[in-house]
């Protein structure tokens, strides 16, 4: 089983990101489960969502305590919420930021990880360019596909198009592709 | 067709396939996505004929369903928590009148303190109303149970609550096989009422019954529940034939063949329990689990047969009879009358507190050694409780309990002075 | 020269039916009448509600050409009409709860729509308690959705079936078990109470009317008018209760007429929130003539008389007459 935990703030599409990830995995024939940790509907509050991927039925319902991959959609959470709980040094870490890990005060933390497991993705900027809104979720999923190799870019894009219709879907799919390729060529 | 879909959407699609003629809806978290999806389905003309009525309260919602069902229409509504309590009078009325309404309960805690997260206190509050209560372990089972419920309800003229854990299932995306219309039509015939308001053949429904007849009428309602114990497995069998998968039934056993300890539970926590059982089995612990699907009628004989080989039973439940202890555990103990089996109660997940594999592993391990207190409150923060109790000792006007506890968690500011 | 001839009833004798054109005669005069509330029910002697319900439901049933489904709230009518193991209803009839009759009727109407049964109509009925208090939320919802239901309220101004407790329709100074004639302000308090006909008008529904058992032709005519329309319709019928009001059973019609003639119970019709018809008062009477016949107001007349309250009640009547234009123009 591969477990992903996503962090962000209400309104940034964290829950949708987890759902799209589960759809992408489903399209590849996996079993997948996605769900948020909940609060009342409120923009700006810290939000967590979870996604599990497995090749057999997923029965576990607890929050993801030991993520294999962590996706952080909003770096302002870094020193407010215990984002890294349960992530061991073999896991994957993607953060939506234009800054370096060092600038974020995480230089030492990420040095324990294999270098290709951690990645800073300027997802909000990518989204702004492609979609016209700084919603980083699609781009981060493209980055996730590249960094972890757990799902294909095609599946991510198909899931994105299923969630967002027409031009918006295409734009998000393009953002995901750009993030994917940027990481692959590095 | 296999879909990766939100639980509430899967449930809505399953319900639409059952061809309800009247759907009445009042919003309450966490069932709202179900009725929202149904309103889209109806508006798009995908479910015809169907009248979708937006009502002014949950009490009205079930009342509209009562009228519709009495007029011979297949009726559906959904609610949770406070909403279920608000319609409590109508809940008993529908059961007493024998109207085959199907209602989804998106299980949610009842306040005060107000809480929108999952536990079973809502459906437990109506467990003795005469409604059949079925609990879903997964979203697949949730979809399937609704289809079975319409058939069962109409067969014996009893209303049915299908209980689906709020958020945990309703808001989870997972793989569900949504049947096609032909399959559902083959399984579920059109509604043939036992009683109906018909100008060609007028009847009076809902008359007063005095002491001379009430006991008999009540007994007959109980008898219908006992009939359901026979009917539920039959309908699950019919379902398996048409849809080619097992779903529902009264109970289901998991790795209990040589188990010394058997865990009993309802709903989605069973999934986590099965994973925990597997881990303990890998360590050589002889442990198994039994899932109860039908909480009402309570399958006393079937449960006894499933449990009587074990030395001890551990009931994990998301509810609490304040002043007594476990509700499910009390029911389970009844099925084990006369046996020496120890029954331990684990109260877990109240108000949506996560039930973790590691906490369960610890609790099951201690139960297996008969070293657990009864009832055991899983992951309860005893230090916070003790501090609040100390506050009560110290001063009469200790303040609202919920606020005090939340202040400890740093979620509420300091008192105004 | 022609002049309008007005027929009215005194006591329980119906006069004038045979002098009217056939289409103006009441349902009660025909052999084919259904007796939808048939004999054998357990209503009190002189019960205004039993009379009003028989007329109203028979008229509605004829207007629906025999295809009418009825929902009843808990209350006197429901209890006295269905004493186990008997029922006096000769049409399909459902009793669910006290507070949900409008919602249950909504459900029946929805079922009929889903089944394409546009020929079958829906009637909901309840007392004043079930209508303006406990059933108020459901009533407003039914109005707001404009569900195709005729709702009839039988208003005897208190919770009679449970032993005469006040409701939101209990008039000021009236004695009930929960507004006893004691203390500085005996009986129900001035300023309490609601006017459901005006509230129904505020919802803008197709038809609202008030009626009384003192004017049975008028009552039937209003039922017929309502049944010729679709959507949410509300009929509010004043029905004296000899037991609860402390009036003589033989005075039921008389008391009901005095309520109208004093101005305390205006007879009006409205469509989509606009007043369309009022019944002018033929012979105006002071409120005292009406109040004196009812023991629930007896404390106003004990020495020393409560002139202040009597004047205040008279002022209510005066306001109604002015507001609705109830006086005959001088000829």
Image (cartoon, coloured by chain):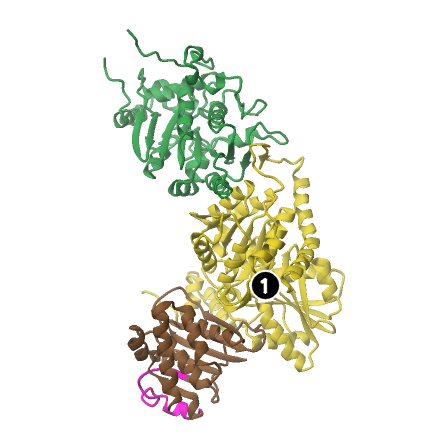
**Chain B: drawing colour:** yellow
Disc 1 crowd rating (10 Å Cα; few below 14, some 14-19, many 20+) is many
> What residue does disc 1 label?
B141
Query: Can residue A84 be seen in the rendering of this structure?
Result: no
Q: Position of residue C119 (x, y in %)?
A: 49, 34
Q: Position of residue C202 (x, y in %)?
A: 32, 38
Q: Quadrant of the N terminus of chain B?
A: bottom right
Q: Nearer the viewer, residue B206 or C98?
A: B206
Q: Is residue B397 above or below residue B281?
A: above
Q: Is C134 in the magenta?
A: no
| Magenta region, residue range | A94-113
Q: Position of residue B49 (x, y in %)?
A: 49, 47
Disc 1 element: helix
Q: Position of residue B376 (x, y in %)?
A: 60, 69
Side of B116 where B202 appears, left or right: right
Q: Quadrant of the C terminus of chain B?
A: bottom left
What residue lies at 36% left-to-right and 74% top-to-bottom?
A: A172
Q: Is A106 in the magenta?
A: yes
* Magenta stretch, main secondary structure class: loop
Q: Which chain is green?
A: C
Q: Which chain is brown?
A: A
What residue lies at 57% left-to-right and 22% top-to-bottom?
A: C39
């Amino acid at each position: 089983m591969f477990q992903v935990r996503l962090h962000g703030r209400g309104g940034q599409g964290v829950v949708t990101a987890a759902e799209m990830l589960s759809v992408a995995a489903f399209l590849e024939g996996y079993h997948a489960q996605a769900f948020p940790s909940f609060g009342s509907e409120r923009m700006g509050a810290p939000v967590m969502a979870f996604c599990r991927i497995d090749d057999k039925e997923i029965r576990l319902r607890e929050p993801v305590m030991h993520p294999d991959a962590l996706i952080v959609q909003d770096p302002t959470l870094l020193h407010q919420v215990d984002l890294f709980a349960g992530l061991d040094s073999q896991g994957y870490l993607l953060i939506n930021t234009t800054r370096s890990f060092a600038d974020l005060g995480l230089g030492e933390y990420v040095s324990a990880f294999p270098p290709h497991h951690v990645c800073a993705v300027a997802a909000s900027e990518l989204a702004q360019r492609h979609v016209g809104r700084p919603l980083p979720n699609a781009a981060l999923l493209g980055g996730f596909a590249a960094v972890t190799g757990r799902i294909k870019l095609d599946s991510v894009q198909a899931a994105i198009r299923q969630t967002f219709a027409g031009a918006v879907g295409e734009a998000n799919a393009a953002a995901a592709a750009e993030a994917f390729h940027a990481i692959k060529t590095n | 067709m296999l879909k990766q879909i939100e639980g509430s959407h899967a449930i809505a699609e399953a319900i639409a396939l059952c061809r309800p003629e009247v759907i009445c809806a009042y919003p309450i978290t966490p069932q709202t996505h179900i009725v929202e999806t149904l309103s889209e389905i109806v508006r798009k003309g995908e479910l015809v004929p169907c009248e979708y009525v937006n009502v002014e309260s949950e009490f009205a919602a079930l009342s509209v369903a009562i009228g519709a069902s009495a007029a011979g229409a297949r009726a559906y509504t959904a609610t949770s928590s406070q909403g279920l309590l608000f319609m409590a009078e109508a809940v008993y009325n529908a059961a007493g009148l024998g109207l085959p309404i199907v209602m989804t309960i998106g299980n949610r805690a009842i306040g005060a303190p107000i809480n929108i997260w999952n536990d079973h206190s809502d459906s437990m509050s109506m467990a003795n109303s005469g409604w059949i209560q079925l609990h879903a372990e997964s979203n697949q089972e949730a979809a399937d149970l609704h289809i079975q419920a319409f058939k069962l309800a109409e067969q014996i003229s009893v209303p049915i609550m299908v209980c689906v854990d709020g958020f945990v299932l309703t808001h989870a995306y997972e793989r569900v096989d949504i049947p096609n219309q032909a399959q559902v039509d083959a399984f579920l015939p059109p509604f043939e009422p036992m009683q109906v308001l018909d100008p060609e053949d007028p009847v009076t429904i809902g008359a007063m019954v005095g002491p001379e007849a009430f006991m008999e009428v009540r007994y007959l309602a109980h008898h219908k529940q006992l009939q359901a114990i026979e009917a539920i497995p039959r309908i699950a069998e019919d379902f398996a034939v048409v849809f080619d998968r097992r779903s529902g039934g009264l109970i289901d056993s998991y790795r209990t063949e040589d188990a010394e300890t058997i865990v009993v539970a309802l709903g989605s926590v069973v999934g986590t329990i099965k994973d925990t059982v597997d881990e303990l089995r890998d360590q050589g612990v002889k442990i198994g689990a039994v899932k109860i699907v039908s909480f009402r009628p309570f399958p006393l004989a079937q449960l006894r047969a499933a449990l009587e080989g074990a030395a001890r039973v551990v009931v994990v439940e998301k509810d609490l009879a304040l002043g007594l202890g476990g509700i499910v555990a009390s029911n389970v103990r009844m099925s084990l009358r006369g046996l020496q089996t120890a029954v331990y109660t684990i109260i877990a997940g109240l108000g949506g507190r996560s039930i973790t594999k590691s906490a369960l592993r610890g609790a099951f391990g201690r139960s297996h050694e008969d070293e657990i207190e009864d009832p055991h409150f899983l992951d309860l923060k005893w230090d916070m409780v003790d501090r609040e109790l100390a506050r009560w000792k110290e001063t009469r006007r200790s303040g609202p309990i919920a606020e005090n506890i939340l202040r400890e968690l740093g979620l509420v500011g300091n008192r105004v002075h | 020269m022609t002049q309008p001839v007005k027929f009215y009833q005194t006591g329980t004798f119906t006069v004038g039916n045979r002098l009217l054109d056939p289409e103006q005669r009441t349902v009660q005069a025909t052999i084919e009448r259904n007796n939808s509330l048939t004999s054998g029910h357990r209503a009190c002697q002189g019960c205004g509600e039993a009379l009003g319900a028989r007329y109203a439901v028979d008229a509605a049933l004829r207007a629906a050409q025999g295809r009418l489904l009825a929902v009843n709230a808990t209350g006197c009518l429901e209890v006295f009409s269905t004493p186990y193991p008997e029922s006096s209803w000769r049409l399909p009839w459902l009793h669910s709860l006290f507070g949900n009759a409008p919602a249950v009727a909504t459900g029946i109407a929805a079922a009929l729509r889903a089944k394409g049964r546009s020929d079958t109509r829906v009637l909901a009925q309840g007392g004043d308690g079930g209508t303006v208090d406990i059933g108020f939320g459901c009533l407003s919802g039914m109005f707001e959705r404009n569900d195709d239901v005729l709702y009839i309220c039988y208003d005897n101004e208190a919770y009679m079936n449970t032993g005469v407790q006040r409701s939101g329709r209990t008039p000021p100074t009236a004695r009930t078990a929960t507004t006893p004639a004691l203390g500085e302000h005996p009986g129900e308090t001035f300023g309490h109470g609601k006017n459901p006909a005006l509230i129904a008008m505020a919802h803008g529904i197709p038809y609202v009317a008030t009626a009384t058992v003192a004017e049975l032709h008028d009552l039937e005519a209003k039922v017929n008018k309502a049944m010729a329309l679709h959507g949410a319709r509300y009929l509010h019928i004043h029905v004296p209760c000899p037991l609860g009001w402390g009036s003589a059973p033989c005075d039921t019609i008389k008391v009901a007429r005095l309520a109208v003639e004093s101005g305390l119970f205006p007879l009006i019709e409205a469509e989509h929130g606009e007043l369309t018809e009022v019944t002018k008062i033929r012979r105006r009477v002071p409120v005292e003539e009406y109040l004196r016949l009812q023991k629930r107001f007896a404390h106003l007349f004990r020495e020393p008389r409560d002139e202040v309250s009597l004047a205040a009640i008279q002022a209510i009547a005066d306001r109604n007459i002015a507001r609705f234009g109830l006086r005959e123009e001088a000829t």
